[in-house]
């Protein structure tokens, strides 16, 4: 993957997640909703240890605002509101390499 692949994933959604199982569901959902070539970039930096270190917060990044919207819509449809909540979104928060 080139740095440009990470830079393209700049549409972020930062969420507060109450349970680790919901974190893993959102990781899978972000990969499902990402339209880019390297779908795993969407959930980079959201491992359980990262989530715990950030006190239950995780940021998912997408290559298009429509991917982010789909992610949020599907999360709202599939998961109970008490298990997660949207904190913020950004159109200029690019992903970074995790390894």
Image (cartoon, rainbow, N blue to C red):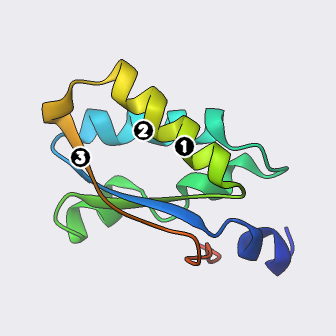
State the residue at coordinates (52%, 33%). 29
* Chain-order first, disc 2 or disc 1: 2
Q: Residues within 10 Å of mark 2 (few under 14, many from 20)?
A: many
- Name the residue tied to disc 2: 26
Mark 1 or mark 3: whose residue is earlier in sequence: 1
Q: Which mark is residue 18?
A: none
Q: Position of residue 16 (x, y in %)?
A: 23, 54
Vertical position of residue 97 compared to residue 71: above or below: below
The crowding category of the residue bearing disc 3, from other C-alpha atoms within 10 Å (few below 14, some 14 to 19, many at least 20), is some
Secondary structure found at label 1: helix
Q: Nearer the viewer, mark 2 or mark 3?
A: 3
Which of the marked residues, 2 or 3, is nearer the chain's N terminus? Answer: 2
Q: Quadrant of residue 66?
A: top right
Q: Residue at x 35, y 59 (%)?
A: 58
Distance from the alpha carbon under mark 2 to that under mark 3: 12 Å
The residue where tag 3 is placed is: 85
Q: Looking at the picture, does residue 27 appear above or below residue 64? A: above
For the C terminus, the quadrant is: bottom right
Mark 1 and mark 3 in contact? Answer it, CB < 8 Å: no
Q: CA distance from mark 1 to mark 3?
A: 14 Å
At a point 24% along the width and 41% down the height, the residue shown is: 20
Residue visible at 40% across and 31% down in the picture: 75
Percent coordinates x, y for residue 24 in the rendering: 39, 38
Looking at the image, which is closer to me, 12 or 45? Answer: 12
Q: Secondary structure at mark 3?
A: strand
Q: Which residue is mark 1?
A: 69
- Image position, residue 92 (x, y; %): 59, 78
Asked whether the residues under the numbered discs 2 and 3 touch, taking CB atoms below 8 Å apart as contact, a structural biologist would say: no
Q: In the figure, 56 relative to 3: above or below?
A: above
């Amino acid at each position: 993957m080139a740095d440009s692949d990470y830079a393209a994933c700049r549409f972020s959604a930062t969420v507060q997640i109450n349970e680790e199982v919901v974190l893993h569901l959102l990781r899978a959902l972000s990969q499902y909703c990402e339209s880019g070539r390297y779908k795993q970039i969407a959930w980079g930096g959201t491992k359980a240890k990262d989530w715990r270190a950030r006190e239950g917060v995780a940021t998912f990044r997408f290559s298009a605002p429509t991917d982010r919207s789909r992610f949020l819509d599907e999360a709202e449809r599939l998961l109970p509101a008490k298990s997660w909540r949207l904190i913020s979104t950004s159109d200029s928060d690019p992903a970074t390499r995790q390894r």
